[in-house]
Amino acid sequence: MITPKHIAIIMDGNGRWASKRYLPRIQGHKKGIKAVREAVKNCNNLGVETLTLFAFSSENKNRSNNEVSLLFKLFLNVLKKETNKLNKYNVRLKIIGDMGLFPQEIQQAAIDAQTLLANNSGLTLVIAANYGGQWDIAQAAQKLAKQAVDGKINSDEINIESFEKYMSLADQPKVDLLIRTSGELRISNFLLWDIAYSELYFTDILWPDFNSTELDKAIVSFNNRDRRFGSRKDKAC
Ligand code: IPE
Ligand code: IPE
Ligand code: MG
C-alpha cells in the first residue's frame, strides 16, 4: 500500500452534523476539531509528509457575524491550546491564506505556533485559513509582476516553474490525494493550481464523523487509481 505524500482535505459538513442532532452549528465545529486531532495523529503515524486542511475559505467570512466570530474564537483556542501537543508529536505547522482578515491576537498566535514548531521533522500540518485558490494564484502573480517591474526578471522568464515558486505550497510535495467530506462534489475555491494531477476522493461522511477507518478507505481508493499524468505506460500506439 502506498501512503500518499501529501493529503489535502476539504473538511465539510460540521453544520449538517449539528443540525441532524438539533444542536447549534458551533457544536459541529467543535466536534470537527476532534476529527482534526485524529486526522493529524493518523497521518503522522502513517508517515504522510504533508496534511493540508481547509479550515476557513475566503468566502466563509460572508457567513453570519455570529458564526464567523465563533469560528475565530475556536481557531484562537486551538492555536493556543494544541500547539504543545503538536510539538510532542514532532509536527510542523504552516498557515496559508490571507491572514490580514484575522484579529491581531490570532495573527500573533499563528506566528508563535509556527515559530515554536518550525524545527520539527514529522508531519507538516498546513492550515488554510481565509484561503482561496484564486487568491493564491493572484498573490503569486502579484509577486512575479513586482520582480518584473523591479527589473529582476524578464517577462519571458515567467513560466510554470517560476510561477509555482510563489504559490503557498511551493515548499511542499505535490498534492497526491484530495478528500472532500459531506457529499458535495465541488472544490469551493480550495487548492486550484496544486490539484492539477491530484486524485479526488468524495465521501458522504460528515467531517465530525471522519475517523481512521474513513481515512483508510480514502487511501485504499487512492491505491486503486492508475495515475497516468497524461502519459501511457505501454507507449504502444
Ligand atoms: C465546514 O463545515 C467548516 C467550515 C466551512 C468552517 P460547514 O460549516 O460548511 O458545514 P455544512 O456544510 O453547513 O454542513
Ligand atoms: C468549503 O466548505 C470550505 C471549508 C471546508 C473550510 P463550504 O461549506 O464553505 O463550501 P460550499 O459553500 O458548500 O461550497
Ligand atoms: Mg459546508
Image: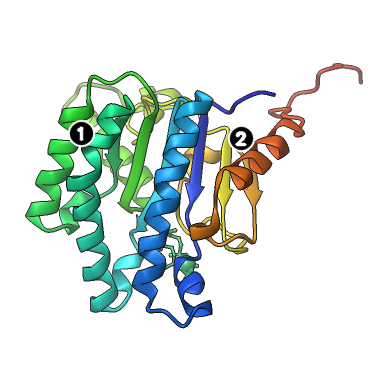
Q: What residue type is labelled 1?
A: Gln
Q: In the displayed structure, would residue 10 be above or below residue 22?
A: above
Image quadrant where residue 23 sits: bottom left
Q: For label 1, count other residues whose C-alpha is less than 10 Å away and answer few (under 14), some (14-19) or many (20+).
A: some
Location of mark 1 (residue): 114
Picture residue at 35% right of the left edge, 66% below the top = 60
Image quadrant where residue 119 sits: top left
Picture residue at 32% right of the left edge, 31% below the top = 166
Picture residue at 41% right of the left edge, 61% below the top = 31
Q: Where is residue 174 in the image (x, y as percent from the top left)?
A: 50, 28
Q: Are marks 1 and 2 in contact (CB under 8 Å)?
A: no
Picture residue at 49% right of the left edge, 41% below the top = 8
Q: Is residue 40 visible?
A: yes
Q: Nearer the viewer, residue 149 or 139?
A: 139
Q: In this view, does 102 lie to the left or right of 51?
A: left
Q: Is residue 12 left or right of residue 162?
A: right
Q: Position of residue 228 (x, y in %)?
A: 73, 27
Q: In which quarter of the image is the C terminus?
A: top right
